[in-house]
Image (spheres, grey):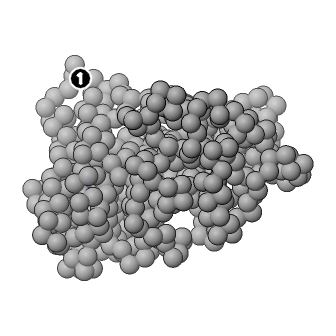
Amino acid sequence: MTDSYTRLVNTGITKTLAKKLGLPRPAVLRRHRPGDPLTVGPVLVLSDAASKADADRVAQALLAWELDVRRDPVELRADPGRLGAVVLVLTELARPQDASEAVLAAGSVLRKLAPHGRVVTLSRARTEQDSPELAAARQGVDAFCRSLAKELRAGATGNGVVLTDGAAAGSTSALAALRFFLSARSAYVDGQLLEVGPTDAALPTSWDRPLEGQVAAVTGAARGIGAAIARTLARDGATVVCVDVPAAGEGLARTANAVRGTALQLDVTAPDAGTRLLEHARARHGRLDVVVHNAGITRDKLLANMDAARWDSVVAVNLASQLRINAQLLEAAERGEVSGLRVVSLASTSGLAGNRGQTNYAFTKAGVVGHTAATGPLLARHGGTANAVAPGFIETDMTRAIPFATREAARRLSSLLQGGQPVDVAEAIAFLASPAAAGVNGQTLRVCGQNMVGR
Ligand code: NAI
């Protein structure tokens, strides 16, 4: 559900009043519905001179997705219609001064960008071998993209795909990431740059059901974000094992029935949780392809008032359980019982920026970012990946418990001027779990509407 302020400033007489008073008006975001067009209008592909061949490859891919692709900003300015997206290809940018023509061309069409439009940059990551000039040009794209995202309005977003390890602009995961950022699936992802490496994986045969034939386990699936993840993975074609504690049995059964999956009553802190999860998935569904570590708790207290029960329980549920389950899954991969496993874990922007009263929670969520970076290469040996998502303020039971004033400030302090919905987190997880995202590994993707808090 959209929050009441967003509803008020987008309907009837209160909309007119809000306009007159110049109040901030968060847009009702466009979210993915199977069958809807990928973008809300034509896509303009721009590049600096050196990146033109890459821009041609990207334009070809967009044409294959049946998008209306334009290349000429001057012609487009004369067109009375609105623009759905701008893709800015800067992959071969060698010197900072070579960016100006392309970025200014992008700027010249921004006023034509439709509500819910998209700007996506495609660039290369800095490497240790780069000359100072090359490193400056490549790093420049990072905060250019984040700044541009802060200038967009009406539900439009700006994000970037950053190629690493010599990945090609037209490679599977680069295109899959580009498509995710262009689509309504990334409604609440804003101002983010995602690193993408090379992969042998193929693009999906159906973009509406990229997880067809896969078996996914989601912990903490009885309610909130976990239930949304289960629904979204099932919508994308996966068979879902829904996991939660016995005390949440009712909600767990509800989610499992809704997604036509199976329910597994399991406390993730159990010493053999990973083994039991794998055994259940293999016995009931024959395999396990995706594990989403979503179960999490908060026990907020200032550190001066923190007791061992609060600290230790948060560490046990949010972090130690994930480490133990991953270790058991890695052992199973060594034995050949699973391969190509995709692990996606829930971090939090609190784990990036820190949050007063949450030293325990932030410690565990930063720990998730850390173990994800270290687990990625270990799983890659068996064809798998480990990634994390860091939600900002998401409208759930967890955040409904926050005092009103703090809650309201947390919502509005983002470029999209609102909290996200559980489905926004779920869409990012579904993308990272999809086979075409095989080149994304060890990353943490923020789903926070470009919350002003943190890096
Ligand atoms: P929630 O409290 O609504 O749901 C958490 C679920 O995890 C519950 O169903 C609960 O029974 C289950 N769970 C708790 N301990 C468990 C255990 N030991 N074993 C198995 N299941 C267990 O939480 P919400 O808001 O849906 O959050 C989900 C995840 O997203 C958590 O990891 C949370 O830290 C993270 N997150 C949430 C944000 C938000 O704004 N709601 C922001 C950033 C991160």
User: Where residue 39 appears, x then y in whole percent?
Assistant: 68, 59
Few, some or many C-alpha atoms within 10 Å of disc 1 (few <14, some 14-19, many ≥20)? few
* Residue located at (39% from left, 29% from top): 353
| 337 sits left or right of 451 in the view | left
Q: Secondary structure at mark 1?
A: helix
User: Where residue 18 appears, x then y in whole percent?
Assistant: 76, 34
> For residue 8, what is the image quadrant?
top right
| 44 sits left or right of 428 in the view | right
> For residue 399, what is the image quadrant?
top left
| 54 sits left or right of 330 in the view | right
Disc 1 Cβ-to-ligand 1 distance below 8 Å: no
Which residue type carries mark 1? Leu
Q: Is residue 372 visible?
A: yes
Query: Toward the viewer: 30 or 78?
Result: 78
| 318 sits left or right of 71 in the view | left
The residue beneath circle 1 is 303
